[in-house]
Image (cartoon, coloured by chain):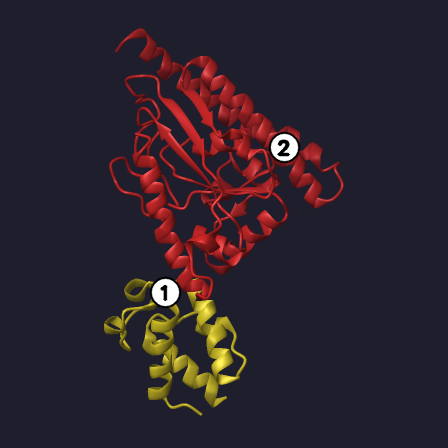
Chain colours: A red, B yellow
């Protein structure tokens, strides 16, 4: 192992530590202070702003430490509100990268993070959407976009296993079709598999991974579908459509 | 008032029309989620259609425990008897 790679192992450890401490600090210090802000909606917006800024700083730290490098293409398309952002999910830090790029971020978070001491503070105070599943989840997502949050969703539901094809669940398409709301696709590609599912954090890739986030043009589900269709069928069609679209767009970027 | 056979026929046809379910896979024993790819969101749509068709108010909760097409037929039959 060369010295650069050893450094990346240490730096990755530092990043995880900072992430954990940041989560606890937000839980203990910062967000209780938000109780002084009147109104639950305003409080959530402040909390989202704190998380957005926190992640911006965190991503800057990761790049400065040389753990990763990041490049954003079409980032100006993210400078809006009320976006429904769909992305593929190759690594653990995807959501960190995306939340560092969009203001007023919202996200569907698995229930386990509500119980994790490092993450329960931020996810609660920012009012992220608990992945309880079913119709309530779809309604929560639609409502979030309507409140002009920028909702980030990974249609795969979990990180892609390296080497396996994309397998989209129907939730994302259901939100788009039933909203109805346009979709802003983001293609995430990493030059090296990094923090993939089932890999321990200290097994860093041979070379420093370069992340490219490509923001593509909005997709109106109506353009991809026949409008007379029932929502249930439209969601199935749009799921297939999106899965093909992402598979194609990822393939031409690797 | 529909009998069980009529209810089954209506449900099978609605699954084909609404979700393009393969008719060959539909049977009383077919499991909605595992065999027919009908999730809880689809189930709500299905209940709405059932209400329109029967003109009877139905709570999605009445279908909470259903697993198979046969369970749905039984649940609908019970509701229509009330």
Q: Position of residue A239 (x, y in %)?
A: 38, 53
Q: Position of residue A12 (x, y in %)?
A: 40, 19
Residue A51: tell me if it is visible: yes
Q: In the rendering, which numbered label is found on residue A130?
A: none
State the image coordinates of residue A14 (x, y, percent, origin top left).
Answer: 45, 18
Quarter of the image for residue A150 reads top right
The chain that hosts pointer 2 is: A
Q: Which residue is mark 1?
A: B38
- Residue at the image point whose x is 57% and y is 26% from the top: A54
Quick one: SS at disc 1? Answer: loop
Q: Residues within 10 Å of mark 2 (few under 14, many from 20)?
A: some
Which chain does tag 1 point to?
B
Residues beneath discs 2 and 1 located on the same chain:
no
Instruction: Return the residue nearer the eye: B35 or A111.
Output: B35
- Circle 1 packing at 10 Å, graded few (<14), some (14-19), many (20+), is some
Q: Is residue A197 visible?
A: no
In three-dimensional space, the C-alpha distance between marks 2 and 1, rounded to whole angstroms, equals: 38 Å
Q: Position of residue A10 (x, y in %)?
A: 38, 15
Position of A137 relative to B54 (above/below):
above
Q: Which residue is mark 2?
A: A49
Residue under the image location 30 percent in, 17 percent down: A207
Q: Are circles 2 and 1 on residues that touch, CB within 8 Å?
A: no
Query: Which quarter of the picture shows residue B34?
Result: bottom left
């Amino acid at each position: 192992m060369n010295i650069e790679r050893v450094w990346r192992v240490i730096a990755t450890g530092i990043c995880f530590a900072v992430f954990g401490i940041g989560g606890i600090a937000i839980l203990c210090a910062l967000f209780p202070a938000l109780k002084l802000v009147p109104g639950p909606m305003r409080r959530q917006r402040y909390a989202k702003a704190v998380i957005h800024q926190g992640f911006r700083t965190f991503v800057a730290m990761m790049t400065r430490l040389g753990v990763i490098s990041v490049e954003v293409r079409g980032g100006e398309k993210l400078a809006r509100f009320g976006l429904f952002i769909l992305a593929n999910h190759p690594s653990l830090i995807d959501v960190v990268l995306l939340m560092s790029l969009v203001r007023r971020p919202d996200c569907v978070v698995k229930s386990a993070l509500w119980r994790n001491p490092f993450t329960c503070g931020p996810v609660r105070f920012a009012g992220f959407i608990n992945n309880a599943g079913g119709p309530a989840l779809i309604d929560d997502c639609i409502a979030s976009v309507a409140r002009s949050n920028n909702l980030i969703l990974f249609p795969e539901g979990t990180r892609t296993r390296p080497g396996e094809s994309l397998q989209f669940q129907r939730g994302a398409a259901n939100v788009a079709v039933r909203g109805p709301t346009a979709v802003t696709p983001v293609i995430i590609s990493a030059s090296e598999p990094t923090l993939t599912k089932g890999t321990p954090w200290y097994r860093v890739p041979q070379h420093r991974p370069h992340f490219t986030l490509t923001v593509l043009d909005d997709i109106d589900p109506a353009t991809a579908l026949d409008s007379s269709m029932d929502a249930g069928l439209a969601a199935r069609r749009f799921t297939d459509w999106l899965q093909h679209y992402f598979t194609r767009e990822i393939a031409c970027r690797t | 008032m529909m009998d069980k056979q009529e209810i089954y026929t209506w449900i099978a046809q609605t699954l084909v029309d609404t979700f393009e379910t393969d008719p060959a896979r539909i049977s009383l024993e077919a499991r909605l989620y595992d065999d027919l790819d009908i999730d809880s969101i689809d189930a709500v749509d299905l209940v709405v259609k059932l209400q329109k068709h029967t003109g009877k108010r139905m709570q999605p909760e009445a279908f909470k425990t259903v697993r198979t097409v046969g369970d749905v037929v039984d649940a609908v039959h019970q509701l229509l008897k009330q």
